[in-house]
Amino acid sequence: MREVVITPAEAGQRLDKFLHKYLKDASDGFLYKMLRKKNITLNQKKAAGGEKLCAGDRVCLFLSEETCARFGGGEKALGKQRQLAEQGAAAYRKLHNITVLYENAHILLLDKPAGALSQKASPGDLSLNEWLIGYLLARGSITEASLQTFRPSVCNRLDRNTSGIVICGKSLFGAQEMTRILKDRSLHKYYLLWVEGQMREGRRLEGYLHKDAKTNQVTVFPAWQPQTSPIVTVYKPVAVGERETLVEAELITGKTHQIRAHLASAGFPLIGDYKYGNRAQNEERKRRLGITCQLLHAYKVVFPALSEPLEELSGREFQAPLPAVFLADSLYRPGETPQFSRNTFPK
């Protein structure tokens, strides 16, 4: 007999979904038969499979070790868990300047530096996903064995060369709730960016975006075209320099490269953006200021009203400090210190 105690990270899922992860090679018929015959019980009682699991629940499997090993994936599954743990440990050692801005039992907010991947682009990469697993393993928040039934991961992605706040699901419930508020857009995300040109007023910018999957490049159109998605970006100037502007933007929609392409289409390309910006001016600033990537920072999130156990986040605002390059004196008028505060965007 095996007894599995449900951890906070695994709580919130249905019993049958959990069993499909724990005994991933078992058929539906086998699992429901074992539940009917009380060969699998929940808290010492017969279960149907649709019960929602809570932290501390006890799932007992009155099965032989050979059966558990065969349906659990055996050495292959153990090897996968070991690989995830090893990659996590390697990422935790090698990826630097990742800061935990906030953490509770269900989520983390990380400050990602420019240059770090949110998730793997190729099998050999180490990304924030692996770093997160390494961080949680190092603190005893998860175990190598628990990776079989729930794998903590990032909930929103930033481009490799974009810095700032990344939201991570530490538990299944946390991941589900963060995914929900990202999808329904009730979580407000704000960015700071330096653009070419003097921007004197804010706008609500609408358009249609098409992504070329082969080149990973997007095109913005003013009117609908086949295979395009509607996009909305709201922005306003914060500090104006002689030939550049520090801008705060809010993503109303969240598409690939949206801010970069949308602002460029409006005549304000991001400084340091070689894909959508001005190459000659980017090269000049690279030589003079050492700017090697687009100056785009996901600096603030504001949470909507949430219920327990995430009620403490309701209405709260979190900010990630600006990278030093954003505050270079040469990027705005001498003596003018940008003021970063909550803005009311045009409707």
Image (cartoon, rainbow, N blue to C red):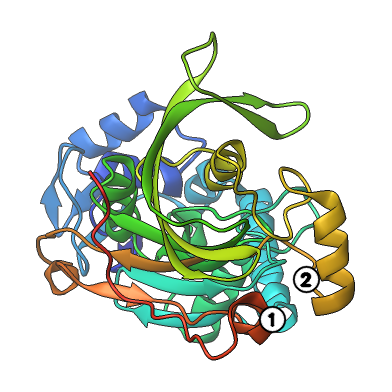
Q: Is residue 73 left or right of residue 60?
A: right
Q: Which mark is residue 291?
A: 2
Give the quarter of the image for residue 218. top right
Q: Which mark is residue 307?
A: none
Q: Which mark is residue 330?
A: 1
The x, y position of residue 109, in whole percent, is 41, 72
Q: In the figure, 153 relative to 109: above or below?
A: above
Q: Amino acid at mark 1?
A: Ser
Q: Amino acid at mark 2?
A: Ile
Residue at 71%, 43% in the rendered image: 276
Can residue 5 be seen here? The reply is no
Label 2: which secondary element: loop
Query: Which mark is nearer the camera, 2 or 1?
Result: 1
How many C-alpha atoms fall within 10 Å of the one at disc 1: few (<14), some, or many (≥20)? few
Along the line of sight, the residue nearer the viewer: 187 or 259 = 259
Along the line of sight, the residue nearer the viewer: 136 or 45 = 136
Residue at 77%, 58% in the rendered image: 125
Q: CA distance from mark 2 to mark 1?
A: 12 Å
The x, y position of residue 153, in whole percent, is 49, 58
The x, y position of residue 259, in whole percent, is 53, 47
Residue at 55%, 44% in the rendered image: 263
Can residue 305 be seen here? The reply is yes
Looking at the rendered image, the quarter that the N terminus falls into is bottom left
Label 1: which secondary element: helix
Along the line of sight, the residue nearer the viewer: 125 or 42 = 125
Q: For the view shown, which residue lies furthest in the bottom direction?
A: 335
